[in-house]
Image: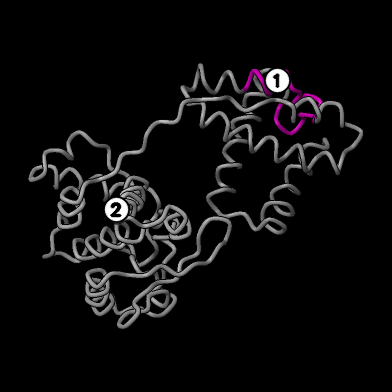
C-alpha cells in the first residue's frame, strides 16, 4: 500500500468528519473531487489508483487536471476553484503527516485559484414571489407542503440545506413566531416569521402531525427532502406560475434566487445591510 491511500482515508475520517465536522454536502463534494482526480491521474500515469504515490500527484499533474475539468468536462471557473480547494485541503493535511514530501506539497499549494466574473443573482419582484408561492395545488398534500415551504423560503431567506434540515420542533408559532435553523459551518440562529408564514405553518404542522424530530417538510416517503428535490419543485412551480406572471419566463428561479429575493425585500424596506447580513 502506498502512502496516498491511508492519507486519503485519514483526511476524510479524522480531519473532515471528526475534527472539522464538515457537512455531508462538503464531504460529498470533496469525495467527488478525489474520484475525478484519481481517475485522471491513473489515466495519465498508467498506474491503478491503489498504486499512486503522493509524488505522482505533483503540481504539473494537478494543473493538467484543472485544465481537463474546464476544457474537457466543461466545468466553470467556480467549479474548478472548488475542486482545487478540496485538493489544497488534502495537501495541507498531508504536509503534517508526510514532511518528506514537503517540496511536492508546497508546489501544489502554490497553485492559485482562477479569477472569474461573478454573475448577478436574480431576484423576484413582489408580484413574481406571490405568483410562485401560490402556484402549488392546495387540493393535494404535496401542494400544501410546497406552499408552506416556498413561503418559508421567500420570507426567511434560508439556504436549501437549512430548509431541508428543519424539524417540527424547530418551529415556534404564536406570539413572537420564529424558527431555529442550523446554518453554514454549524452556526445556529433564530429567524423571525411574519404573521402570514406563522398561519401557513400552523396549518401545515397540524396536517403534518409529526414527531418533534421529524422533518418539517418531508418527502412522500417521510424522510427529509433532498437538495435536488427542492430545486425540482421550485422549478416546477415557477413554470406553473409563469402562466399567470409572464415575467417569470425570463428568469431562472432557484433556491438561491429565493434567498436573494428575501435580501432585496429587506433592502427595499430600508433595513440596514448589516442587519440583513445577520439575518441571512
Q: Residue furthest left?
A: 244
Residue at left offset 14%, top offset 46%:
240
**In this image, 124 relative to 106: left or right?**
left
User: Left or right: where does residue 115 sit relative to residue 16?
Assistant: left
Asked if residue 50 is among those painted magenta in the image, a careful observer would answer: yes
Secondary structure beneath dot 2 equals helix
Position of residue 119 in the picture relative to residue 150 (left or right): right
Specify start and end residues of the magenta stretch as a single range.
48-65
Foreground residue, 35 or 248?
A: 248
Image location (x, y in percent) of residue 196: 22, 69
Task: Using the rendered image of the protein, determine whether residue 58 is visible from the camera's viewpoint.
Answer: yes
Q: Name the residue: 9% across, 43% down.
A: 243
Q: Which residue is mark 1?
A: 61
Q: Which residue is mark 2?
A: 265
Relative depth, front residue between 276 and 210: 276
Quarter the C terminus occupies: bottom left
- Dot 1 falls on a residue whose secondary structure is helix
Depicted 189 relative to depicted 108: above or below:
below
- Give the residue at x 19% y 61%: 143
Along the line of sight, the residue nearer the viewer: 89 or 208: 89
Rendered location of residue 169, percent (x, y): 41, 78
> Is residue 244 rendered magenta in the image?
no
**Which of the labelled discs sits on residue 39, or is there none?**
none
Query: Where does the N terminus fall, quadrant-wise?
Result: top right
Q: Provide residue 11's location: percent of width, then percent of height.
A: 73, 47
Which of marks 1 and 2 precedes in the sequence? Answer: 1
The reply to whether dot 2 and dot 1 touch (C-beta < 8 Å) is no
Looking at the image, residue 83 lies above or below residue 72: below
- The crowd level at tag 2 (other Cα within 10 Å; few <14, some 14-19, many 20+) is some
Amino acid at each position: 500500500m502506498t502512502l496516498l491511500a491511508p492519507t486519503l482515508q485519514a483526511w476524510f475520517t479524522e480531519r473532515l468528519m471528526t475534527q472539522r465536522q464538515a457537512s455531508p454536502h462538503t464531504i460529498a463534494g470533496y469525495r467527488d473531487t478525489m474520484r475525478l482526480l484519481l481517475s485522471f491521474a491513473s489515466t495519465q500515469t498508467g498506474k491503478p489508483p491503489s498504486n499512486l504515490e503522493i509524488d505522482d500527484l505533483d503540481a504539473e499533474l494537478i494543473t493538467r487536471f484543472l485544465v481537463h475539468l474546464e476544457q474537457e468536462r466543461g466545468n466553470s471557473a467556480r467549479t474548478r476553484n472548488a475542486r482545487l480547494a478540496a485538493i489544497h485541503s488534502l495537501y495541507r493535511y498531508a504536509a503534517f503527516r508526510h514532511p518528506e514530501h514537503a517540496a511536492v506539497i508546497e508546489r501544489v499549494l502554490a497553485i492559485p485559484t482562477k479569477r472569474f466574473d461573478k454573475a448577478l443573482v436574480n431576484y423576484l419582484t413582489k408580484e413574481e414571489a406571490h405568483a410562485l408561492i401560490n402556484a402549488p395545488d392546495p387540493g393535494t398534500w404535496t401542494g400544501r407542503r410546497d406552499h408552506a415551504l416556498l413561503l418559508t423560503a421567500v420570507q426567511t431567506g434560508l439556504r436549501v440545506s437549512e430548509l431541508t434540515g428543519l424539524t417540527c420542533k424547530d418551529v415556534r408559532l404564536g406570539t413572537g413566531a420564529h424558527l431555529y435553523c442550523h446554518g453554514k459551518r454549524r452556526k445556529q440562529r433564530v429567524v423571525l416569521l411574519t404573521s402570514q408564514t406563522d398561519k401557513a405553518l400552523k396549518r401545515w404542522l397540524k396536517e403534518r402531525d409529526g414527531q418533534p424530530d421529524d422533518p418539517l417538510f418531508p418527502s412522500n416517503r417521510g424522510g427529509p427532502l433532498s437538495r435536488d428535490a427542492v430545486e425540482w419543485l421550485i422549478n416546477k412551480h415557477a413554470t406553473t406560475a409563469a402562466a399567470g406572471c409572464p415575467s417569470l419566463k425570463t428568469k431562472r428561479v432557484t433556491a438561491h434566487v429565493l434567498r436573494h429575493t428575501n435580501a432585496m425585500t429587506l433592502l427595499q424596506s430600508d433595513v440596514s445591510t448589516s442587519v440583513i447580513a445577520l439575518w441571512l
